[in-house]
Image (cartoon, rainbow, N blue to C red):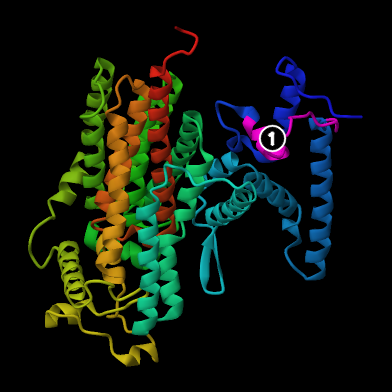
């Protein structure tokens, strides 16, 4: 019997077909304004008539029963396997459900991105080392999801998103590959060069994933909310450490007491990366508060802002304070001020000054040009060393995985290569591999071509944000969300001048995810204006 065509007037059959396709391919593979297009692309060849499947849909109770039965069977298999190997049999019941949960996250890109956005902060500390490569839990979900979506991308013959700045991104990736060749030519450690290169390049795949699989403002806001929730948990954990010292190494406690007069908030990653995360979290949270029409959502977002600000103060990282102040100023002078907004800002400012003002004044009062200003003098030495390296290797740099002595370079006022003996014996303490700036780090490793390509890529992103802000008749909530995302990333980029944030996976993952979401949101804003201003074909 021939299959019955699905007519536009048969909503029951069309609904079944759409639901079946969404189960198979997830909500991101269907265009938001034409869901049936996703169904046709999934199950029908080009030019074929759309038909309804004759297979009856599976009821959800039966599906749940099969999942539980499968999980139970897998649990028994792991139980006997662990018992035979004298392993921890108590984890056997959790393994199948963890596998099923991970499978669901990977199968549906929206759920996977939401989980990754939340897990970047609190679960990024769960990591293991395989073949000298450290991998954390969010990274596993991200890479598995990317591999699955890349396979579907190729099989379906999809095209790259027009939002992707192909030339600048290709230039940056190409410069990074040249950095690997330079590292091999100069004799840098191959293992260290790959690890170094991975920190700067790996999470571009997360940028590509979010750019191609996020399609609606609601999806953007949901993922951002998950990110804000995860960072709020990290900030709470950091403040708990500030007052209890739980989980902080003894030498770090002594160092904080000597140089800062108390324990610094650092959570799982340390004070510096936590300060950078709070820059992103505060900007995103403020943007969500201003973009939401729900008072409950505004209240939750305001609580997250206050929590993240407090955690940032307890890190005692002045660079993060400057970046947060810049982000908040960008938002304040960009959005329309209402009486309620001004009143809430004043109240929070007064309470913040009373509770934390003395800590900020005390820390900022330590800035001086003297031998006692350890942090500032160290950075001057690092930046001086980076300048001398650039003078010697201006085009291609020293390659990934390079190491050097900052003291020797500053003392000789020129680049001094490390002694060959350091590759044979244990690395001396005076050999370093960082210059405490993300931009100078790229300059040292990939030269002018690497830094120029990255700045080109970031300039195009900033240009797209400015174009979105200038759109006429743009919905205020969308404008506020774009402003908050832009402020968060600009604050992060400002903070990166003083810290090499790409060396921490939690920072790199956050940066590339938010960069993709902000780019997608700016494009959606432009589409909204075009759809609103387009003439109605029924008129005239």
Between residue 394 and residue 496, name the one nearer to us: 394
> In the displayed structure, does residue 463 sit left or right of residue 375?
right
Q: Residue furthest left?
A: 369
Q: Residue furthest right?
A: 1
43 is within the stretch colored magenta: yes
Magenta-highlighted residues: 37-56
Between residue 8 and residue 112, name the one nearer to us: 8
The location of residue 95, given as percent across then percent down, is: 72, 54
Main SS of the magenta segment? loop
Q: Residue at x 27, y 45 (%)?
A: 491
Q: Which residue is mark 1?
A: 47
> From the viewer's perspective, is residue 235 above or below residue 424?
above
Q: Residue at x 54, y 57 (%)?
A: 126
- Count the labels in the image: 1
The location of residue 157, given as percent across then percent down, is: 60, 48
Q: Is residue 263 visible?
A: no
Q: Residue furthest top?
A: 540
Q: Quadrant of the N terminus?
A: top right
Q: Is residue 102 visible?
A: yes
The location of residue 524, given as percent across then percent down, is: 43, 31
Between residue 105 and residue 50, name the one nearer to us: 50
The location of residue 343, given as percent across then percent down, is: 24, 20
How would you rate the neighbour count of disc 1 (Cα within 10 Å): few for under 14, some for 14-19, many for 20 or more?
A: few
82 is within the stretch colored magenta: no
């Amino acid at each position: 019997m021939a299959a019955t065509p699905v007519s536009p007037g048969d909503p029951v059959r069309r609904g079944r077909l759409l639901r079946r396709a969404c189960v198979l391919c997830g909500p991101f593979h269907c265009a938001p304004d034409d869901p049936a297009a996703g169904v046709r692309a999934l199950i029908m060849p080009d030019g074929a008539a759309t038909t309804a499947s004759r297979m009856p849909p599976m009821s959800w109770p039966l599906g749940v029963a099969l999942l539980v039965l499968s999980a139970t069977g897998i649990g028994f298999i792991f139980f006997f396997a662990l018992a035979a190997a004298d392993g921890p049999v108590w984890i056997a019941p959790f393994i199948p459900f963890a596998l099923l949960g991970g499978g669901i996250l990977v199968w549906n890109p929206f759920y996977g991105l939401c989980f990754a956005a939340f897990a970047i902060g609190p679960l990024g500390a769960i990591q293991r080392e395989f073949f000298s490569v450290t991998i954390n839990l969010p990274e596993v979900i991200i890479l598995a999801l990317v591999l699955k979506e890349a396979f579907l991308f190729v099989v379906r013959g999809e095209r790259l998103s027009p939002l992707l700045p192909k030339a600048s991104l290709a230039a940056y990736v190409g410069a990074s590959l040249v950095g690997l060749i330079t590292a091999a030519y100069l004799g840098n450690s191959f293992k260290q060069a790959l690890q170094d290169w991975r920190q700067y390049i790996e999470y571009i795949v997360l940028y590509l994933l979010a750019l191609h699989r996020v399609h609606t403002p609601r999806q953007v806001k949901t993922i951002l909310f998950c990110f804000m929730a995860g960072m709020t948990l990290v900030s709470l954990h950091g403040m708990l450490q500030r007052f209890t010292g739980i989980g902080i190494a003894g030498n770090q406690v002594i160092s904080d007491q000597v140089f800062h007069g108390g324990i610094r908030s650092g959570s799982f990653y340390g004070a510096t990366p936590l300060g950078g995360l709070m820059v992103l979290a505060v900007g995103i949270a403020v943007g969500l508060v201003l973009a939401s029409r729900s008072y409950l959502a505004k209240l939750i977002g305001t609580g997250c802002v206050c929590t993240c600000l407090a955690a940032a103060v307890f890190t005692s990282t002045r660079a993060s304070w400057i970046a947060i102040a810049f982000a908040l100023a960008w938002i304040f002078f960009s959005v329309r001020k209402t009486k309620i907004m001004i009143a809430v800002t004043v109240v929070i400012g007064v309470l913040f000054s009373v509770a934390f003002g003395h800590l900020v004044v005390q820390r900022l009062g330590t800035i001086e040009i003297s031998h006692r200003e350890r942090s500032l003098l160290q950075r001057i030495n690092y930046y001086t060393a980076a300048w001398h390296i650039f003078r010697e290797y201006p085009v291609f740099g020293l390659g990934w995985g390079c190491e050097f002595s900052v003291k020797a370079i500053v003392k000789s006022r020129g680049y001094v290569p490390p002694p060959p003996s350091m590759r044979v014996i244990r690395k001396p303490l005076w050999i370093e591999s960082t210059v405490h700036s993300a931009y100078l780090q790229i300059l040292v490793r990939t030269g002018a071509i690497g830094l120029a390509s990255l700045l080109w890529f970031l300039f195009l992103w900033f240009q797209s944000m400015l174009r979105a802000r200038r759109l006429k008749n743009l919905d205020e909530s969308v404008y506020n969300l774009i402003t908050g995302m832009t402020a968060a990333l600009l604050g992060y980029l400002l903070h990166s001048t003083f810290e090499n944030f790409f060396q921490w996976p939690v920072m790199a993952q956050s940066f590339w995810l938010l960069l993709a979401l902000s780019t997608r949101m700016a494009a959606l804003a432009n589409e909204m204006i075009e759809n609103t201003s387009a003439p109605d074909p029924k008129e005239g």
